[in-house]
Amino acid sequence: MKIAFLGTSAFAVPALKALVEAGHDVVAVYTRAPKPAGRGQQERRTPVHETAHALGLAVRSPKSLKGEDEALAFKALDLDAAVVVSYGHLLPKSFLDAPVLGCINIHGSLLPRWRGAAPIHRAILSGDRETGVTTMRMDEGLDTGPMLLAERTPISAADSAEAVHDRLAELGARLIVSTLDGLMRNTIDPVPQPSDGVTYAHKLGKEEGALDWRRPAAELERKVRAFHPWPGTWFEFNGERIKVLAAGLALAAGTPGTLAVGRDGFPVVACGVGGLRFLQLQRPGRSAQPADAFLRGFALTAGTVLPPPAIMSLPPSKPAG
């Protein structure tokens, strides 16, 4: 097929590589424009831009897709299809209608569950036992288009967002090749998304990473995994924001926020139900440490009561309607 690829983040990179390896003619790659980053504030290209450059593909980085000039330039590509993965710009109708077979999106959830910006994180946070990838033909709604193919994968009790992200990125790469093959052969019938079971994956914010000890420990442990590596989870003590990089569950009693130290030297915080056992902690500007070593160099002692955050987390997403 003659296709354009629209993507930005690392999640999209395996799909771009897979399409090229499958022999598709990727005539243009659209990605977000470079942004200043790091201490030197030098412009940094997106992961998709770097990959496209390495593959010798033409790259376009318009700041906006609105306007007649961009629409005409996209239409002039004379595409069979466009593949959209974690792009970051909404596609206007002129773009959606331009390719013969439409714009095909790779979404990191089992639609209609977890439409929106952060499906992987919300699935882990909500305790979902499985997730997956869905390919769909895009329409003007937010992840509302008819579904083409889907594939499932379990979420284990040890999975972080990073681990699930990488697994789904590879799964999506395989699935988009199968999707385009099915569309070429006319063996895929698009299926409208059901109205039942729709949930929305709200965009993540840094302040949502605050750990509220009044919540059940199981919920907080999922949050630690769901928010790793970004935006991270944390608590405040003596004016410092301490990052919790890894945690587990433990038995605990007492007022939520009360710290105990186990025989193994690892701290446990009493929660609304059960306890959260810190495994890895990090102070601002310092290296990450195992939690037992962290205690030896920081004034967190048994009996300390950690206060709840001033900013509360968002509630879990409820089914639409």
Image: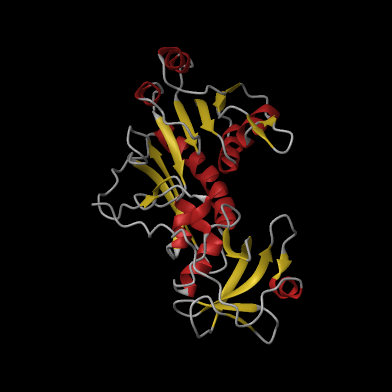
Q: Nearer the viewer, residue 288 or 320?
A: 288
Q: Specify whether 259 is left or right of 176.
A: right
Q: Residue at x 64, y 29 (%)?
A: 52
Left or right: where 51 falls relative to 310: right
Residue at the far left: name it.
321
In this picture, residue 78 sits left or right of residue 173: left
Q: Which of these two is toward me, 219 or 23?
A: 219
In the displayed structure, 255 sits above or below 234; it is below
Pinpoint residue 95: horizontal percent, then vertical percent: 40, 23
Q: Is residue 96 above or below residue 303?
A: above
Q: Residue furthest front?
A: 238
Which quadrant would residue 187 be assigned to in this image? top left
Tell me residue 306's x, y (percent).
Answer: 56, 72
Residue at x-position 57% and y-position 67%: 158
Q: Position of residue 55 (x, y in %)?
A: 67, 29
Near-viewer residue (304 or 318): 304
Count of marks placed on residues:
0
Q: Is residue 95 above or below residue 111?
A: above
Q: Quadrant of residue 279?
A: bottom right
Q: How is the rendered protein coloured?
A: secondary structure
User: Which one is in front, 67 or 289?
Assistant: 289
- Residue at image x 42%, y 63%? 126
Spot occupied by residue 161 in the image (x, y as percentages of width and height): 55, 56
